[in-house]
Image: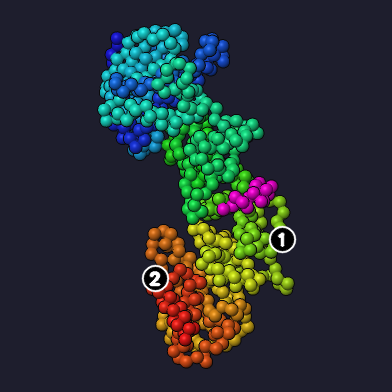
């Protein structure tokens, strides 16, 4: 038996490993299994080169064993194995350039993925183990070797008995880490970190022919899209994300140059249209799991999707600071964005009906993507559709009555902005932005919607929480071309009837009846004569207030204006009433207008009930 000192300053090294990886200690199993996968791959390479012969019927696999009584967790492979010299090189002399170099380079790095830089994958076992043993036998027939260390400065290495080729790692689990002696926990970790590794992985293998591997060695994303069926896509989605609601559609990614990337991104069915539900995009390197939702590789807005992306060109344990500055990673991010945009544009062009049926599930994602990524916006802006008050879906060109756009040019860019800019009236080029009215709450704003319909006007539905942000974003992108107004913000401007002088007497009657100095009151004849009065609210003050509420701030007060409709027959007769009846009728009209504008407060609702009871009393006299 040989004893010696590990060629690192382990009293410095081990605390760093544990400190930097403590928040994600589960990853040790991925590192140990990945080492076994790598050993098998190396052996199969020798077989393919004809350097060694393959045993008939041999299954290349990883076997994981949990022994609660012995307090051990074992990972065994039948890969290339190691000689004594190789154990010394790859295990004992872990920091090839010396611990001081390692510490100088990485101690201040904040823990950005140190495992993998100096063969530290094996040493991650000490995050959960007090002692680790290695039993290994090389393919070349050298004597089997046993290595062990408690993670301190010393180790032992000696020959041992081992019949089969490969390596077995035995981890003696610490008492405070006993959760890793639960078979259910190990199975959970295998499914999370090793679900697509290229060789079968078994837990507590019995060898009775009934064992089933926990992983899938040929994930669907590795197949060409033309060879995948709809049923396979849906099954893969359910198995991977445990979501039993079928996705609405998906994007199959497959790139070989200038970088290698495969994957599938799924558009999940939205469970609540008023929320942006965070998805899960799993990133892999050669079928080895790296992490979920790495924003340096996957654009933030795409994290609303579910998916798997496998990119061999991204190192398994690369730091995030590297990812942020790597040009290749930036190209990968742009490629993924383009493929998603192209899928949406293709569906819009080839199956408009299906696109419209899916839009309620896609709208928040697309709008959020536009706000977060200008390249995505440039590609999809012409396929953003809006349901109008007549139930028809239209994009901005169609809604504004502009000519249909031709085929997209310049890699998917479209011409909405140019089309709006080119819109002209009969005499001269229009210098005024086109006003688009929108509905934020169809039920609450039903009276305004009816007035628009009766007048032959149109408006679009913008009833999701992201829409106040999105209409502001569109105005920012096209400041001289588009202006959005909520349907209850400028009703007099949209439905204005004949001009007339302001009626100060009517205004005084309503001011005395309402008693709200903050409420502005105006008179105006409207095209719709049935409605006695409406309330308008300042568009931009309200948007500011709504955005403040979205970010957890108190809603600011929004300036409101009451428009008294002088074309209404009740308003025309109100001056003929007694002072008492004028006050009652004006107050009742204000309650009706307020109820059409917003949900009444308890006090406002009580007052409205009292007004109705008084009317009933008068009616039965």
Q: Residue at x 66, y 46 (%)?
A: 346
Do labels 2 and 1 touch, CB within 8 Å?
no
Q: Which of 11 and 384 is in front in this view?
A: 384
- Against 328, residue 69 (above or below) is above
In the rendered image, residue 563, in percent from the top left (x then y), is placed at 53, 79
Cα distance in 3D space between marks 2 and 1: 49 Å
Q: In this view, does 195 lie to the left or right of 431?
A: left
Secondary structure of the residue carrying tag 2 is: helix
Q: Is residue 133 left or right of residue 273?
A: left
Within 10 Å of disc 2 (Cα), the crowding (few <14, some 14-19, many 20+) is few
Q: Nearer the viewer, residue 188 or 414?
A: 188
Secondary structure of the residue carrying tag 1 is: loop
Q: Find residue 232 and report its image quarter.
A: top right
Quarter holding the N terminus is top left
Q: Residue at x 70, y 68 (%)?
A: 424
Instruction: State the extent of the magenta-drawn residues as a range.
Output: 346-360
- Against 103, residue 604 (above or below) is below
Q: Tag on residue 602?
A: 2
Q: Which residue is drawn at 61% across and 51% down?
A: 357
Q: Find residue 129 and report its image quarter.
A: top left
Within 10 Å of disc 1 (Cα), the crowding (few <14, some 14-19, many 20+) is few
Q: Tag on residue 403?
A: 1
- Against 76, residue 314 (above or below) is below
In the rendered image, residue 265, in percent from the top left (x then y), is placed at 55, 40
In the rendered image, residue 306, in percent from the top left (x then y), is placed at 51, 42
Image label count: 2
Q: Which of marks 2 and 1 is nearer the N terminus?
A: 1
Magenta-span inclusion, residue 565: no
Q: Residue at x 31, y 35 (%)?
A: 19
In the rendered image, residue 364, in percent from the top left (x then y), is placed at 53, 53
């Amino acid at each position: 038996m040989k004893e010696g000192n590990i060629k690192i300053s382990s009293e410095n090294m081990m605390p760093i490993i544990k400190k930097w990886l403590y928040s994600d200690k589960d990853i040790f199993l991925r590192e140990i299994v990945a080492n076994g996968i790598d050993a098998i791959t190396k052996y199969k390479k020798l077989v393919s080169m004809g350097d060694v012969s393959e045993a008939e019927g041999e299954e290349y696999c990883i076997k994981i064993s949990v022994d609660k009584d012995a307090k051990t967790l074992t990972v065994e492979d039948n890969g290339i194995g190691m000689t004594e010299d190789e154990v010394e090189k790859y295990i004992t002399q872990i920091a090839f350039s010396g611990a001081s170099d390692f510490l100088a380079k990485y101690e201040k790095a904040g823990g950005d993925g140190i495992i993998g830089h100096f063969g530290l994958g094996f040493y991650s076992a000490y995050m959960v183990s007090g002692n680790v043993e290695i039993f290994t036998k090389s393919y070349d027939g050298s004597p089997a070797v046993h290595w062990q260390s408690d993670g301190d400065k010393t180790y032992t290495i000696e020959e041992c008995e081992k019949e089969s080729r490969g390596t077995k790692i035995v981890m003696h689990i610490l008492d405070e880490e006993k959760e890793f002696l639960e078979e259910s926990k190990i199975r959970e970790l295998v499914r999370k970190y090793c679900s697509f590794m290229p060789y079968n992985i078994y837990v507590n293998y019995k060898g009775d022919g009934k064992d089933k591997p926990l992983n899938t060695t040929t994930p669907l994303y590795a197949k060409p899209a033309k060879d995948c069926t709809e049923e396979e896509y849906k099954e893969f989605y359910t198995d991977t994300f445990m979501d039993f609601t079928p996705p609405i559609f998906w994007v199959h990614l497959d790139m070989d140059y200038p970088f290698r990337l495969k994957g599938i991104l799924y558009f999940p069915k939205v469970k609540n249209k008023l929320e942006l539900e965070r998805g899960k995009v799993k990133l892999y390197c050669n079928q080895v799991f790296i992490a979920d939702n790495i924003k340096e590789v996957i654009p933030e807005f795409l994290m609303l999707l579910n998916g798997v992306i496998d990119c061999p060109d991204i190192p398994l344990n690369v730091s995030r600071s590297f990812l942020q500055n790597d040009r290749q990673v930036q190209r990968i991010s742009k490629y993924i964005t383009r493929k998603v945009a192209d899928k949406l544009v293709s569906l819009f062009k080839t199956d408009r009906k299906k696109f419209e049926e899916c839009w309620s599930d896609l709208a928040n994602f697309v709008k959020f993507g536009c706000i977060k990524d200008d390249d995505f916006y440039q590609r999809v802006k012409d396929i953003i559709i809006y349901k109008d008050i007549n139930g028809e879906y239209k994009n901005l060109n169609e809604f504004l009555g502009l000519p249909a756009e031709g085929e997209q040019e310049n890699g998917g860019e479209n011409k909405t902005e140019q089309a709006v800019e080119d819109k002209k009236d009969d005499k001269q080029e229009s210098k005024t932005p086109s006003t688009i009215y929108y509905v934020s709450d169809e039920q609450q704003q039903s009276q305004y919607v009816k007035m628009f319909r009766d007048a032959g006007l149109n408006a679009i539905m913008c009833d999701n929480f992201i829409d106040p942000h999105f209409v502001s974003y569109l105005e920012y992108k096209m400041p001289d071309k588009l202006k959005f107004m909520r349907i209850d913000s400028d009703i007099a401007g949209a439905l204005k009837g004949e001009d007339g002088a302001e009626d100060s007497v009517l205004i005084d009657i309503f001011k005395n009846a309402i008693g709200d100095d903050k409420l502005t009151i105006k008179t105006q004849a409207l095209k719709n004569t049935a409605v006695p009065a409406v309330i308008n609210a300042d568009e931009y003050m309200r948007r500011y207030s709504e955005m403040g509420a979205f970010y957890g701030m108190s809603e600011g007060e929004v300036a409101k204006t009451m428009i008294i409709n002088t074309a209404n027959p009740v308003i025309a007769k109100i001056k003929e009433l007694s002072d008492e009846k004028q006050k009652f009728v004006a107050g009742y009209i204000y309650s009706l207008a307020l109820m059409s504008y917003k949900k009444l407060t308890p006090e406002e609702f009580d007052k409205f009930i009292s007004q109705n009871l008084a009317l009933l009393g008068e009616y039965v006299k």
